[in-house]
Image (cartoon, helix red, strand yellow):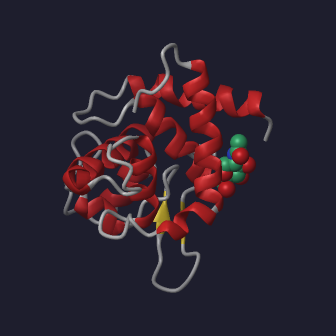
Amino acid sequence: MSLIKTAIVCVTAAVIFALVQGQGSVQPNCLGCICEASTQCNVSVGCHTPYAGAYFCGPFLISWAYWADAGKPVIQNDDPNRQGAFENCVNDLYCSAETVRQYMGKFATNGDCNEDGQVDCTDFAQMHRMGGYGCRDPSIRTTDFYKRFETCWKVVQAATVGGGSS
Ligand SMILES: *[C@@H]1O[C@H](CO)[C@@H](O)[C@H](O)[C@H]1NC(C)=O
């Protein structure tokens, strides 16, 4: 994908995520790049089982365990204990973004995954992909996910006046 197209996708996702009224320190631009790196932020990907025991859904490729760690957010009027509540949430752009925010909130105190002395979007991307418990594993840097994230994040930072925001 060209840089221009990446920039457009990232910025579009960031505008959408800016509408998500969530708590926490994960900025809309950051959610946009994590979404972009996961599926090109495609809300139509649905659920798949890439290998036995794995089940990932929605534009952020969220697992049931991740959703549970995030506190089982649900779409409006849904019941977190209802069968299908997980899929309904993580296939929805807003609810999946809220899941990511809450997941990052849970692990933020242990959040300096790349050990550079600050907790920023790069750490959130590592946490998203590797899980909050294993986010310090440097092997993430060789993944396509990480390369896509880095490309998006550079574009977003270059486009953001002042840059450097997380
Ligand atoms: C989104 O994912 C669906 C299902 O995999 C696919 O058919 C569609 O082409 C994708 N859309 C984009 C814009 O990539």
Q: Where 31 sits versus 79, above or below?
A: above
Q: Is residue 122 above or below residue 62?
A: above
**Residue located at (34% from left, 29% from top):** 20
Residue at position x 39%, y 37% in the image = 94
Image vertical order of residue 56 relative to residue 6, above or below: below
Q: Is residue 11 visible?
A: no
Residue that protrudes farthest toward the bottom in the picture: 52
Q: Is residue 159 left or right of residue 63?
A: right
- Which residue sits at x=24%, y=55%? 107
Name the one closer to the observer, 115 or 77: 115
User: Which is nearer the eye, 32 or 140?
Assistant: 140
Quarter holding the N terminus is top right
Q: Quadrant of the C terminus?
A: top left
- Residue 44 % position (x, y): 59, 48
Provide residue 45's location: percent of width, then percent of height: 59, 54
Vertical placement of residue 44 versus 66, above or below: above
**Snapshot quadrant of residue 24:** top left
**Closer to the camera, 147 or 78?**
147
50 or 106, nearer to the observer: 106
Q: Position of residue 129 (x, y in %)?
A: 46, 61
